[in-house]
Amino acid sequence: MQARTISPDRLIARIKTLSRRRRDLTAQVEEEQMRPWPDTQRIRTLKQERLGLKDAIHVTRTMLQRQGVQPPYSS
């Protein structure tokens, strides 16, 4: 079975998308923390999702490096 190769441009676009989603989650966490009675379960869920995005960004960057594309690339 042959490994599938994803173009560097698509990987870079994915990093940008994941990074934007991660920033949005950070803003949501901060907004929830500023409420008089923050919902700790919602904060926990948002932080877990944000961590998952961080991991996905790391994996995608590793895939880029294996293709010979070195940082800096926009994120």
Image: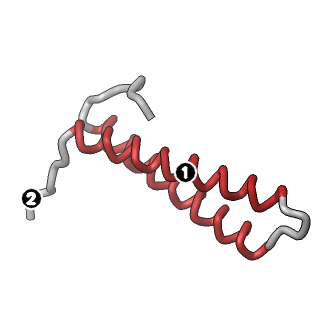
Judge left or right: residue 17 versus residue 49.
left
Q: Secondary structure at mark 1?
A: helix
In the rendering, at what x and y percent does residue 13 appear? 31, 42
- Judge by depth and name the residue closer to the eye, 23 or 62: 23
Question: In the orientation shown, which residue stands out farthest toward the front?
Answer: 36
Rendered image: mark on residue 64? none
Q: How many marks?
A: 2
Q: Secondary structure at mark 2?
A: loop
| Amino acid at dot 2 | Gln
Q: Is residue 20 above or below residue 52?
A: above
Q: Which residue is mark 1?
A: 22
Judge left or right: residue 61 versus residue 69.
right
Question: In the orientation shown, which residue stands out farthest toward the right?
Answer: 36
Question: In the orientation shown, which residue stands out farthest toward the top?
Answer: 72
Mark 2: few, some, or many residues within 10 Å (few <14, many ≥20)? few
Q: Quadrant of the N terminus?
A: bottom left
| Amino acid at dot 1 | Arg
Residue displayed at 40% across by 41% down: 16
- Judge by depth and name the residue closer to the eye, 29 or 61: 29
Residue displayed at 50% across by 52% down: 21
Residue displayed at 23% across by 37% down: 9
Judge left or right: residue 58 versus residue 62.
right
In the rendering, at what x and y percent does residue 8 appear? 23, 37
> Gap between marks 2 and 1, in whole Å?
32 Å
Rendered image: mark on residue 2? 2
Q: Is residue 4 above or below residue 65?
A: below
In the rendering, at what x and y percent does residue 45 appear? 66, 71
In the picture, residue 73 is in which quadrant? top left
Circle nearer the N terminus (2, 1): 2
Question: In the orientation shown, which residue stands out farthest toward the left?
Answer: 1
Q: Quadrant of the C terminus?
A: top left
